[in-house]
Each structure stands twice: as structure tokens, then as C-alpha cells.
Amino acid sequence: MTVAPHTGQIVESPGAAQATTTWRSEDDTAAWAQRLAAQPALANAFITLHGDLGAGKTTLVRHLLRALGVQGRIKSPTYAVVEPHETAQLAIWHFDFYRFDDPREWEDAGFRDIFASPGLKLAEWPEKAAALTPPADLAIHIEAMDETERQVTLRAGTATGRSLLQGLSA
């Protein structure tokens, strides 16, 4: 999938469970998060976020959580590793594995139980815990092109991920 220039519209690549899009501003990021939040398959998805420091992973998560109806302060889970959120319809866990370095922490913190339960799981720096997490339904790779523009590649890893891609491209 590629994006039609200046529309932010996702265009599907033939035969691939992949898409690209460009966010030219934070407003584009927020609008895209709204579209993702409207996808029914999101309710039990595992989404990984990839990109350098400052690429916009946490910004996307904040916009997505707001679009899903999360109220109050939305903290980055950098030091806590996970921040739980809840709406009337959805349990959400936002992980940041940047400082994760002890596999025993996975069991001690109850992450196995979280991943086995219903709800949306969002993970920044998933490669730090890759041996312990299930396959991502949707991997979002964000590359900063300049101060405001982001090139975004979406890769579906499961049927849920493909459903999300199809919904976003409709």
C-alpha cells in the first residue's frame, strides 16, 4: 500500500499486507489515529510501534487513546514499562519496553496475563521484549522526515492486522 500524494489516503500494494502513508503534521497524526480508533478489530489487537527516539510513537499513542475516549493525563510508560487505561468499552495497555532488560520482569509484572486477556495492547520498543510477546497484529514503523513530516509503514502480521489495514484503506 502507498499513500496518494497530499491526501494521506492509504493505498494498498498488490499482494502485500503492508501500507505506507505520510503524516505531514501532528494534525494528520491525530486524524489518522481517529480512523484507526474507528476500526472494530482494534478492540483486541496487539500493535507495535517502531521508530527512533522522537519519531512520534508516543504522540501517536496519545492521539489514539484520546480518540478511543481515554480521559485525564496520559503518561508515557517509559519508567513504569506499562500504563493501563480504560474506557467504558475497552481495556488498553500501553507498554514501553525501552528500559526492559530482564525477562523475569515479564512474569513478575504479570505481562503474560495481560497479553492473554481481552483488550488493546500497544507496545513501543517491542524488539526489547520480542521473544516474550505474541506476534504483532499490526506493526507501525514511523520515520521522521523533518520536524513535522513522518513516513509511516504499516505491516499486518495476522488476520486482525489485515482487517485493520483494510479498514484504514476503505
Image: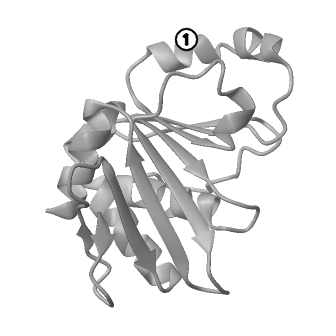
Instruction: From the viewer's side, name the closer residue of 42 and 156.
Output: 156
Q: Is residue 145 above or below residue 166?
A: below
Residue 141, quarter of picture:
bottom right
Q: How many marks?
A: 1
Instruction: Tell me, yes or no, if residue 82 can be seen here.
Output: no
* Residue name at image x 19 percent, y 52 percent: 166
| Residue positioned most to the bottom | 6
Q: Residue at x 19, y 54 (%)?
A: 167
Vertical position of residue 151 compared to residue 25: above or below: above
- Residue 162 appears left or right of 75: left
Q: Quadrant of the C terminus?
A: bottom left
Please identify the quadrant where the N terminus is shown.
bottom left
Viewed as shown, does residue 111 lie left or right of 1?
right
Q: Position of residue 86 (x, y in %)?
A: 46, 38
Residue 124 appears in the figure: yes
Return the x and y of residue 38 as percentages of the image width and height: 24, 55
Residue at left offset 79%, top offset 15%: 103
Where does residue 95 sit, x and y in percent of width and height?
A: 64, 38
Q: Position of residue 121 (x, y in %)?
A: 49, 34
Residue at 62% x, 67% y is 56
Helix, strand or loop for disc 1: helix
Left or right, 88 with respect to 98, comes to left
Reading the image, the residue beneath label 1 is: 113
Q: Kindly identify the amino acid type of the residue bearing the numbered disc 1.
A: Asp
